[in-house]
Image (cartoon, grey):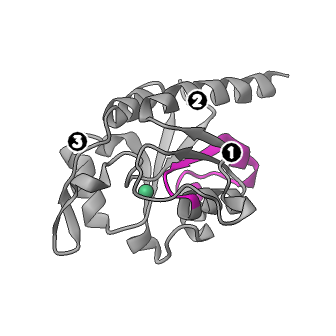
């Protein structure tokens, strides 16, 4: 049974610990997951959530990392800046994810964007008109908003908190539909 809530997710410092990345040239050949991220991502998929990757970087890097951790099958769409030709916070990244999932503007209230970067992920999602979820697990970047539109809709600290948030937001969406 599919869930009403749709999850767009960043990868670096949202699912993968960027501090563990090993590269061959520009391409990441291996990296570890943030503790609990693999389990949470699989749990969301198994629970029926549609998940799209919306990530800046090289296509080969994401295939290497997701294959390594057995996560390739959980993504219904892979939206990677190398292919799209634009980085977040550009709207094209989010628009491409919606198109690949056959979603329309009427579905925007069903979508959350999960990420660690207040400019790429929070500003990008907020400007695009979807809700934003800041995961502040990594301390590699500042979480200080530079503009009002950088403020996340929701804030969590660890991947495991994402499951509870998703369940809550999905229940709200389903209750709204039933009215
Ligand atoms: Mg990131």
Which region is colored magenta? Answer: 98-118
| Mark 3 crowd level (few <14, some 14–19, many ≥20, 10 Å Cα) | some
Determine the residue positioned at 61% across, 45% down: 112
Residue 69, label in figure: 3
Q: Is residue 137 left or right of residue 36?
A: right
Residue under label 2: 165
Q: Is residue 34 left or right of residue 115?
A: left
Determine the residue positioned at 43% across, 35% down: 159
Task: Please report whichever mark, 2 or 3, sits nearer to the chain's N-terminal start.
Answer: 3
Image coordinates for residue 45, horizontal then vertical, percent:
42, 32
The CA span between labels 2 and 3 is 24 Å
The CA span between labels 3 and 1 is 29 Å
* On screen, residue 82 above or below 31: below
Count every numbered label the image shows and give the total.
3
Residue ranking furthest to the right: 179
Between disc 2 and disc 3, the foreground one is 2
Between disc 3 and disc 1, the foreground one is 1
């Amino acid at each position: 049974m599919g869930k009403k809530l749709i999850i767009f997710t960043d990868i670096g410092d949202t699912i993968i610990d960027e501090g563990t990345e090993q590269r061959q040239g520009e391409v990441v050949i291996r990296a570890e997951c943030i503790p609990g991220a693999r389990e949470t991502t699989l749990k969301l998929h198994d629970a029926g959530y549609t998940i799209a990757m919306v990530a800046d970087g090289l296509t080969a890097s994401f295939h290497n990392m997701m294959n390594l951790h057995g996560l390739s099958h959980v993504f219904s769409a892979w939206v990677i800046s190398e292919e799209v030709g634009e980085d977040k916070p550009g709207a094209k990244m989010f628009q491409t994810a919606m198109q690949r999932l056959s979603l329309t503007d009427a579905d925007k209230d069903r979508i959350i964007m999960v990420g660690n970067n207040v400019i790429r992920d929070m500003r990008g999602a907020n400007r695009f008109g979807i809700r934003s979820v800041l995961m502040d697990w990594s301390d590699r970047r500042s979480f200080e908003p530079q503009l009002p539109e950088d403020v996340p809709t929701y804030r969590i600290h660890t991947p495991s908190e994402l499951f509870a948030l998703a369940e809550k937001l999905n229940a709200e969406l389903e209750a709204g539909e039933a009215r």
